[in-house]
Image (tube, rainbow, N blue to C red):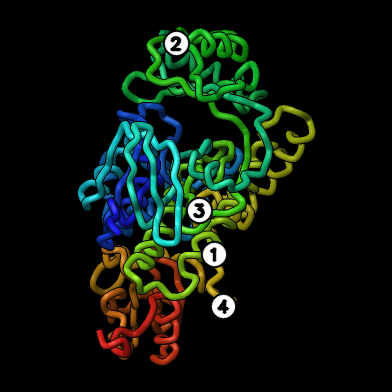
Amino acid sequence: MRFDADVIIIGGGPTGMMLAGELRLHDVDTLVLERDAEPTTAVRSLGLHPRSIEIVDQRGLLDRFLAVGTKYPGGGRFAGIPSPRQVALDTAHDYLLGMPQPITDRLLAERAAELGARIQRGREVAGFEQDGEGVTVELVDGERLRARWLVGCDGGRSLVRRTLGVGFPGEAATTEWILGEAEATASAEEIAAVSERVRQTHRGFGIGPNGEGLYRAVVPAASVSEDRSVPPTREEFRAQLRAYAGTDFGVHSPRSLTRFTDATRLAERYRVGRVLLAGDAAHIHPPLGGQGLNLGIQDAFNLGWKLAAEIAEWAPENLIDSYESERRPAGEAVLTITRAQSELISPEPGPQAVRRLLTELMELDDVSRFFGERVAGIAVRYDVGDGREPLGRRQRDIPLDRGRLYELMHEGRGLLVDQTGTLSVEGWADRVDAVADTSDGLAAPAVLLRPDGHIVWTGDDQHDLERHLARWFGGDMRRAGR
């Protein structure tokens, strides 16, 4: 049977483009279908958290992002509560990398295209059906395309999720905000002073400079819209600014106006047959803490190598299912932390009392670090079948005698870092790299990393290593006669 692609990705946002790049590292024929004819200019996210920065570093993209981003000290702030002092997080990238989402989207799309992903814009999907061998996708224009696998990265109103009939339980929106980028005639001093005053009682409000002479403002809407796909008008935006700040700051010439809500939902399943969900198609939540885009990128990073292994037919049993078993709990944890932050920005006396107590607790380093690591995305630990630390955690970048660890991970393969110089990955050399090197940052004689940088084995025994290689990277090619 003829296939038009190994994988069709529906949705060309950051999740879809990250996934396309990951698949292309493994020569998977990948087609991205994006409904919009042109990339969006809407700024829904303002940058990358430490775990996402680690991810682009692992793939050799960090210099591109640093060239257009701005570093802000501190890896993540919970509910906007300032830490009394900076607590170092367990990462080589203990900062936020500020950049408007359209720039993140562009960099990831450029990377995917460079690696050979086919990206088709202005291509809206009408539906799909799957069988035991693949998925047939029907476009609005009537064209039908065939792929071995389909991944829905098509946002919170995901057509893919709805077509699958996957439940999306959670809480409906109770509050809506308007997010706008616009020029303003008010002075920078006036804008800063008014914003500081209003935020004393309304932490869901904010306005500040966003570069290129623009200001980015967030203000509660008058009500929850019936159709949030309809953008707010300039007059609605200005009216809400006046309602909360007493002035509209003379905003004009808006570059983008969008809506978002506190709706919080998590897909009941991330996979049905040959169709998977990632990013906002699998989870939505308020943007407090800025975790949405980062969570989607991390979904794609987890899924890409596993789906590629399935297509290349070396995936061990249940590897593809580990995408859901690992990433759904990660999504659920983010929903928990954003729900908590939503409560803490409420102006009501109860939430404000809890906020004051938590502000005092933040003076304790362990508390500050606890929340910082969760917002930063570096607290995730996957269940890899062994309860010992550091198994299941991602390995931070560390210096080796001959360079940096992450410099060895650009190709998206597994990696054995062997301080003993006696271990071998010979039967898996087509899937796993090995380096004999030493580092003070490694607490074990040797460490086996998956392509996403998570630790799945430590030790110094060759037989035990081979058992774990088979578990995560399939059969020994020597025994298969390859």
Q: CA distance from mark 2 to mark 3?
A: 35 Å
The image quadrant of residue 446 is bottom left
Q: In the image, what residue type sits under mark 3?
A: Gly
Q: Residues within 10 Å of mark 3 (few under 14, many from 20)?
A: many
For residue 289, which quarter of the picture?
Answer: top right
The answer to the question of whether label 2 and label 4 lie on touching residues, with beta carbons closer than 8 A, is no
The amino acid type found where label 2 is placed reads Val
Q: How far is mark 1 from mark 4, CA to CA?
A: 11 Å
Quadrant showing the N terminus? bottom left
Please state the horizontal and vertical placement of residue 345, each as a whole percent of the image.
66, 33
Residue at 33% of width from left, 46% of height from top? 145
Cα separation, mark 3 vs mark 1, equals 10 Å
In 3D space, how far apart are the residues under numbered discs 3 and 4 (Cα atoms)? 21 Å
Circle 3 sits in a helix, a strand or a loop, which is it? Answer: loop
Amino acid, disc 4:
Asp
Question: Reading the chain from its start, which is encountered first: label 2 or label 3?
Answer: 2
| Lateral position of residue 78 relative to residue 59, left or right | right
Q: Amino acid at mark 1?
A: Arg
Q: Earlier in the sequence, mark 2 or mark 4?
A: 2
Look at 71% across and 27% down and name the residue there: 347
> Residue 263 placed where, x, y %?
62, 35
